[in-house]
Image (cartoon, grey):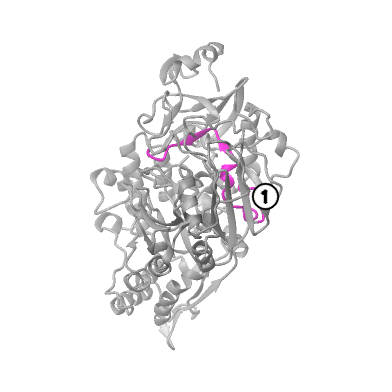
């Protein structure tokens, strides 16, 4: 998933608005080229919504405004800067900041103008230009300028989180080409995604940040331009956002029917169990339940039985990515592929799903699960053509076998699987001596630590540990607080974690940050597994330069196969619907998009809220009308998004870990 800009001439500046969606010829150093000027850009094909669209199909454009949404998060926060590799940023800061373009939730990858009024690009996508909306404003009333856009790119690439350097590494220049125009030039190559990913770049106010140290954490509420701003907070305890009364973009087609609550409040808790009690007591309004056991057992209460507290499943068709026990191949113990594969035989998913998850989950067998991007069966002829040049440098199984995760009978005592694990470990030079697995060469015992952030995972990890002990492996399980966990993961200071890679329907430049040799050496990247493989590097670049959707799919499936047979992870599970518990005081669109529902599309229903209050279910909180008043109350999303790629890109929708 990804999003940037310059102008052609004074003539184009004058007639540009008349050319929306049209192509025109212009001279360039490479000769005549077709220039497209439009309201939107699709990665492949054409945008679904034309230049005159009034709202997205999955939105209720007449949704009333008012009321409150209260949510919970785990842990705490110590910063309002989500764009650096320091501190623990508060939830939902994405509502404060904006981007040049914004995506729709019912297309694979299309961006529509937000701060940008128009976008223009040549056929080869070697550059992109944006014309900013004249009405776009910061919360202090000052206009958003071309200088702000250029400053944002420079700031993020030089002082922002390392992920930005990977994401924007091919953006070589940004220049102002008109009063409200910015052009971005790209490095040579076939990176067709760059115009879209530049459009996704958060735009930050130059006049605000040039007098502050961007690289330090801060609890000073930042200046933004989005639909909400911070109204109240207590570090580590709560943060409240209020809707901006004179928000400049409230009537744009891309925003119509969204951001309907007057206030959003996030309260922080230490434990999921307490969060569930707070929900049932009416102290919070909404929760995405991420634990199968709790979904099955913890909501058998009168409020649910009577229908006041809703417990609903919302189906979606978004990619669920990969969640897994992730082995850090930077550690000597995990550098042999046979060892990594052997350890996977010790995890009895079938037992866990039956006894811990109430059969709710599906085993994940792809890094792009629940999508057409996932590899299945043997390679197709198109995939074979992509993979054949690497035959001598990738596992032979890529060409001859369908990848399947180890299966068991679900009894919790996978004897056959452990026997297979012993065979692989023996091939890799490990032997059993005095009931301990040791290196035949050095005599050192195999031992490693599983690092956890959530106590909910202990009940899953401990049976896994027991089976590893049966192999003679010494395993310790360590649960740490949020700050320590984040810092250790950023520094790759772990042996094994429960890691995750969320995926979009249109993978691209972010794959560099996930899998490439360069990212393996960069602290703060999402290459948790420490993968350094020139073949994977090449496949990632081929994904980025894919000229059409079919090529993208085939190359992504090829990468999927190479990653799977590298055995870098022990896959966990996924679920094809969101489990949501909420008080019946909200309205929501009837037909959610393919990515699932989102509270960005919901609204407060005064009649429902009064009905709840009259029965003493929850405290009444009713604000009628469509005005833009601000209440000091409510919102947030689960801290499970801690490690998901670019939280600021995904704040508006549900996603992330399906895990316990």
- The answer to whether residue 511 is above or below residue 283 is above
Could you tell me residue 321's position as x and y percent?
40, 53
Identify residue for label 1: 232
Which of the two residues, 157 or 19, is positioned nearer the viewer here?
Answer: 19
Would residue 104 be counted in the magenta stretch?
A: yes
Kind of element beneath mark 1: strand
Residue pictured at 47% horizontal, 69% vertical: 457
- The answer to whether residue 7 is above or below residue 285 is above
- The answer to whether residue 464 is above or below residue 317 is below
Which secondary structure type mostly characterizes the magenta part of the structure?
Answer: loop
Could you tell me residue 234's position as x and y percent?
68, 56
Question: Given the current orientation, which residue lies at the most extreme front position?
Answer: 614
Residue pictured at 23% horizontal, 44% vertical: 381
Name the quadrant of the C terminus.
bottom left
Q: Which residues are magenta?
A: 78-107
Could you tell me residue 467's position as x and y percent?
39, 78
């Amino acid at each position: 998933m990804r999003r940037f800009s310059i102008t052609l001439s004074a003539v184009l500046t004058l007639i540009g608005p008349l050319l929306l969606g049209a192509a025109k010829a212009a001279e360039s150093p490479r000769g005549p080229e077709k220039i497209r000027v439009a309201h939107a850009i699709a990665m492949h094909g054409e945008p679904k919504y034309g230049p005159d669209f009034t709202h997205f199909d999955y939105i209720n454009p007449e949704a009333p405004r008012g009321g409150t949404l209260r949510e919970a998060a785990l842990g705490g926060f110590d910063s309002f800067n989500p764009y650096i590799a320091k501190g623990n940023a508060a939830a939902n800061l994405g509502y404060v900041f904006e981007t040049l373009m914004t995506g729709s939730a019912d297309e694979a990858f299309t961006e529509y103008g937000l701060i940008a009024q128009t976008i223009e690009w040549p056929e080869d996508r070697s550059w992109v230009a944006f014309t900013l909306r004249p009405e776009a404003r910061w919360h202090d009333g000052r206009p958003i300028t071309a200088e702000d856009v250029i400053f944002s790119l420079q700031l993020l690439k030089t002082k922002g989180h390392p992920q930005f350097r990977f994401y924007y590494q091919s953006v070589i220049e940004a220049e102002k080409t008109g009063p409200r125009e910015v052009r971005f030039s790209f490095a040579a190559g076939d990176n067709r995604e760059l115009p879209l990913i530049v459009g996704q770049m958060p735009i930050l106010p130059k006049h605000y940040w040039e007098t502050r140290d961007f690289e330090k954490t801060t609890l000073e509420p930042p200046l933004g331009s989005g639909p909400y701003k911070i109204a109240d907070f207590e570090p580590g305890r709560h943060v409240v956002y209020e809707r901006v009364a004179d928000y400049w973009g409230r009537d744009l087609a891309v925003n119509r029917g969204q951001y309907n609550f007057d206030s959003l409040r996030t309260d922080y808790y230490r434990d999921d169990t307490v969060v569930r009690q707070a929900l049932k007591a009416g102290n919070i309004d909404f929760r995405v339940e991420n634990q199968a056991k709790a979904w099955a057992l913890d909501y058998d209460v009168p409020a649910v039985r009577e229908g006041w507290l809703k417990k609903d499943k919302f189906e979606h068709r978004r990619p669920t990515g990969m969640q897994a026990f992730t082995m850090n191949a930077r550690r000597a113990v995990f550098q042999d592929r046979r060892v990594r594969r052997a350890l996977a035989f010790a995890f009895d998913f079938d037992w866990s799903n039956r006894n811990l998850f109430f059969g709710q989950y599906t085993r994940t067998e792809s890094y792009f699960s629940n999508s057409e991007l996932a590899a299945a069966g043997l390679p197709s002829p198109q995939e074979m053509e992509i993979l054949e040049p690497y035959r001598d440098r990738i596992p032979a199984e890529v060409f001859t076998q369908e990848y399947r995760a180890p299966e068991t009978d679900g009894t919790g005592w996978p004897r056959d699987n452990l026997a297979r694990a012993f065979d692989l470990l023996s091939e890799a030079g490990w032997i059993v001596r005095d009931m301990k697995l040791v290196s035949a060469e050095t005599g050192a015992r195999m031992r490693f630590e599983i690092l956890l952030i959530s106590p909910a995972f202990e009940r899953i990890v401990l049976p896994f540990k027991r089976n590893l002990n049966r192999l003679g492996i010494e395993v310790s399980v360590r649960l740490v607080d949020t700050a320590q966990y984040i810092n250790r993961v950023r520094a790759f200071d772990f042996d094994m974690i429960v890691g995750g890679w969320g995926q979009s329907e249109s993978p691209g430049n972010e794959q560099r940050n996930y899998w490439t040799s360069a990212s393996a050496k960069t602290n703060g990247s999402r290459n948790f597994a420490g993968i350094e493989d020139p073949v994977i590097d090449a496949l990632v670049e081929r994904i980025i330069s894919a000229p059409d959707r079919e090529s993208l799919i085939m190359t992504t499936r090829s990468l999927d196969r190479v990653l799977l047979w590298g055995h870098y992870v022990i896959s966990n599970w996924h679920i094809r619907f969101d489990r949501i518990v909420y008080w019946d005081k909200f309205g929501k669109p009837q037909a959610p998009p393919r990515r699932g529902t989102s509270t960005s599309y919901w609204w407060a229903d005064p009649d429902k809220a009064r009905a709840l209050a009259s029965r003493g279910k929850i405290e009444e909180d009713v604000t009628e009308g469509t005005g833009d008043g601000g209440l000091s109350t409510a919102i947030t999303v689960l801290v499970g998004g801690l490690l998901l790629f670019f939280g600021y890109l995904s704040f508006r929708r549900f996603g992330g870990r399906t895990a316990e």
